[in-house]
Amino acid sequence: MRDRKVPAPAEHYHHMDALRASFMLLGVFVHASSLGHDPIFNGIAHASALFRMEDFFLISGFLSAMLVGKYGPGRTVRRRLASVGIPLLCAGLLLNPAAIWLSYNFHNDPDVSFLDYLHGRTIADPVGELRWHLHLWFLVVLLPYALITPAAVSLLTRLAPHSLFRRATTGRLRTMTTITLLTLSGVVVVRGTHKALLDPVFAGTLLDYPAEQTMEYLPFFLLGMLLYLERDRVLPSFQRPAPVLLAVSASGLLAGSRGWIGVLASNNGRLLCETVFTVALTATFFALAGRFINGPRPVVRYLADASYTVYLFHYFWIYVIATLLGFDSGARWPQMLLVAFLTFGVTFAIHHFVILRSRVLRGVFNGKFPIRTRSSRRAAGVHQPAAATVAPDPSYMSGAPTLPLRRVTAGSGGPAFPTVTDAPTMPLRIDI
């Protein structure tokens, strides 16, 4: 049976572009902190752990629900699996083994060759981040999320019109209270489910950490879906500053971390405080981004696209650069900052001068593949007039191509980057 395509609105969520790019680029500083033990970079990593990945998956849920409305459930699942799975497979096979070896040598024994490392000729109990997925675990998590997307959208579509939910989300105070309680309930349920059912199955296996993270961030993925489905009513109430909730939850976190209040110092108490703080901070981020990024900006679009390449390649280059510069595991913030900026330079260059110039590489590393519609198949092989253009996708965040900072046209000394007027098919971008 063919998927029914439900018309989706034509909003452009430009502030989500900006947020997603910012969170991805922040990952470079977070992983540069793994070079040593520095209070400044450790602080960046700790602060990131309070919101960055939660917001990644919230935005991913928002965009996943949007894609179901645009393409139908079946096509959405197929495209998401391809746009997530292929970059995961390629980056995991081509980059991660070398990155893990470099990390091992940096933190342990610098004389182990790559082949010796692959054959397990290493010291016992090495230190450093040596798990097979490294920073790509979030792509592993997105695969089951893609599979459950149609069912989750169907379930939330039934919940949203319910009179009880509508009354509970009338007004700012009720909306934030309901969202916070739903998120807290979801966190408690999925953590308990993982501990009781999944941990005995996956503990000690290669999927141990991804399975744990899949359950940990599921409430935020579902929250993102709910915000999209209720974008006309709940989303405007959510994406407003929440200074009172932010201050109260931050105070709870501080009291728990200092041991001032015993209940908040427990694992469950800190988890609940962190969840409330994340919800409040996310609402504030959305409000600020929506305030300052309220229209199309080429720089934001470019960074939203390039940040994905930066994220896939950055861990490998962090350790390549640190090794070439002769740093060791006692690196401090000046060395970490230098490595981070050099990593930005190399990875942005890879994106701009390599990835953007190859349709194959855009698919392999950015998850962008041509969307073959019935009309485009009929038009295949038919010469297009030189002046013909293609109307842009109504929602950039779910499928429109990323515009480069400067468009280079044919005959101007460089390759023509893909824009809405360059190709008869629209590339599908990965939405995370």
Image (spheres, rainbow, N blue to C red):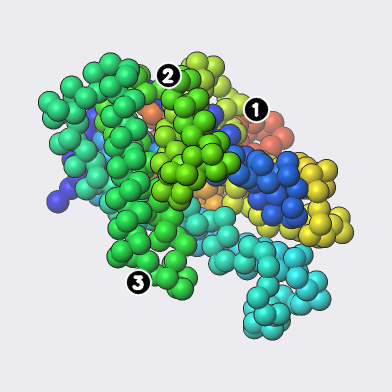
Residue 246: x %, y % from top left: 48, 26
Q: Which of marks 2 and 3 precedes in the sequence?
A: 3
Give the labeled residue for mark 2: 240
Q: Which of marks 3 and 1 precedes in the sequence?
A: 3
Question: For the residues marked 3 and 2, what is the alpha-carbon distance in whole angstroms?
Answer: 41 Å
Q: Please state which of the two labelled residues, at mark 1 or mark 3, is closer to the viewer.
A: 3
Question: For the residues marked 1 and 3, what is the alpha-carbon distance in whole angstroms?
Answer: 51 Å
Q: Which residue does the image show at 74% across and 52% down from the upper left?
A: 37
Q: Residues within 10 Å of mark 1 (few under 14, many from 20)?
A: few
Q: Which mark is residue 201?
A: 3
Q: Residues within 10 Å of mark 2 (few under 14, many from 20)?
A: many
Q: Which residue does the image show at 53% across and 56% down from the upper left?
A: 136
Drawn side of residue 70 relative to residue 253, left or right: left
Drawn side of residue 186 relative to residue 383, left or right: left
Taking depth in this image into account, of 93 and 259 the one nearest to the observer is 259
**Above or below 12: residue 369:** below
- Tell whether label 3 touches label 1 (CB within 8 Å): no
In terms of secondary structure, where does tag 2 sit? loop
**Above or below 431: residue 132:** below
Residue 358: x %, y % from top left: 58, 48
Q: Which residue does the image show at 58% across and 60% down from the upper left?
A: 134
The amino acid type found where label 3 is placed reads Val
The amino acid type found where label 1 is placed reads Arg
Question: For the residues marked 2 and 1, what is the alpha-carbon distance in whole angstroms?
Answer: 34 Å
Drawn side of residue 281 relative to residue 219, left or right: right
**Figure quadrant of residue 383:** top left
Q: Which residue does the image show at 56% across and 22% down from the upper left?
A: 297
Q: Which of marks 1 and 2 precedes in the sequence?
A: 2
